[in-house]
Image: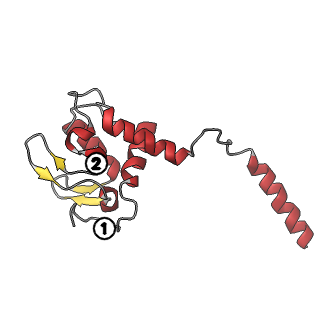
Amino acid sequence: MRKTLMMVMIALGLSLAGTYPAYAGNEDPLSEAVSSGHSLFTSHTFGGSGRTCETCHHDGGKGPTVLPNSVHRPSIAGAAALFPRFNAKAGHVLTLEDQVRRCVVGGLQGMPPAYDSMEMRAMIAYLTSLSHGKAINMGGKAGQ
């Protein structure tokens, strides 16, 4: 019985081995996504007004946020730990992806990345990396 179970497990393992492609890059895929997201955050205009995310969210999102109308807001470091959250003005629950799209459309006047695009995944990976070690406060407010 044990030998049969072991043979089944080995066969299953061998059959799954070809299912996932081996990664041949210098970095791991998550680190590459975070790096790509940082690059998008600091230098990509999304075809908009020439601004980048960093125009308002200083120091790669780790510094203070200063909106174009000079309104000061807290850093977005930790923002990923606040989503999903209910937005009364929108009248529904917003995800971090929704917020990225809202910022790109409103703040950058650009074309937001599609929800399941590599750009969106990279942005979410980067923004989530800024929340590493922060307490989850679903539905919370920035600066709490």
Placement of the C terminus among the 4 image quadrants: bottom left
Q: Which amino acid type is shown beneath numbered disc 1? A: Asn
Checking the image for residue 113, the label placed there is: none
Residue at point 60%, 40% (across, down): 26
Mark 1 — residue? 137
- Sequence-wise, which precedes: disc 1 or disc 2? 2
Residue 52: image location, x then y, percent: 26, 35
Residue at point 22%, 60% (across, down): 142
State whether residue 32 appears in this view. Answer: yes
State whether residue 117 appears in this view. Answer: no
Q: Residues within 10 Å of mark 2 (few under 14, many from 20)?
A: many
Mark 2 — residue? 61
Q: How far apart are labels 1 and 2 at the CA level?
A: 18 Å
Q: Mark 1 or 2, which is nearer the eye?
A: 2
Q: Which amino acid type is shown beneath numbered disc 2? A: Gly
91 or 24: which is nearer to us?
Answer: 24
- Is 141 rendered above or below residue 67? below
